[in-house]
Amino acid sequence: MAGAFGNFCDRWSWGVRTLVQDGNQFASRLGLAAGIYNDAENEVTGAVKDIVVAGAGDPHMSDQQAAAASWSQDAAGVTGARTPGGDMTWRQAGQAAGQQWEGAGQTALGTPQAKAVRDLLGGG
């Protein structure tokens, strides 16, 4: 009985081995390995892009927008280079924000409240 069972197990393992090899050949013919590689590459690329955008990109950009952006757009966000789809560089945006704050400060200093504080402090 033990010998018959051992022969059965040997034949079974060879049969399973053959089926696995046939399955691998079938998968390679269909290109499933390429699809799995492509999925893995896209997953890793997406994770790296999320890290780059989170670390140095636009903080208001969603994950979907980051995934849709090209690497050149991501690099432009970091370096300040102009992109075909962008209106201004980071440097230009910073200058525009500075001008807006300067204008807001000038406006605030011209209010009656600011004049009252200057008069109170003797700066007239």
Image (tube, rainbow, N blue to C red):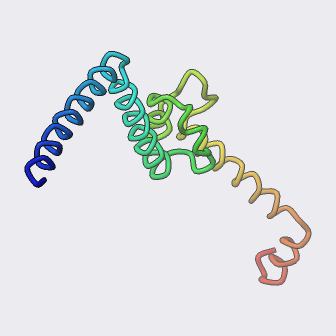
Front residue of 87 and 94: 87
Q: Give the residue displayed 37% in from the left and 34% down from the top.
A: 41
Front residue of 26 and 96: 26
Outermost residue to the right: 112
Front residue of 45 and 71: 45
Relative to 86, say whether 122 is above or below.
below
Outermost residue to the top: 29
Query: Which image quarter: residue 64?
Result: top right
Q: Give the residue displayed 13% in from the left and 53% down from the top.
A: 1
Image x and y of residue 5, in percent: 15, 49
Q: Give the residue displayed 63% in from the left and 48% down from the top.
A: 60
Image x and y of residue 108, in percent: 81, 63
Q: Is residue 120 left or right of residue 59?
A: right
Q: Quadrant of the C terminus?
A: bottom right
Outermost residue to the left: 3
Front residue of 3 and 18: 3
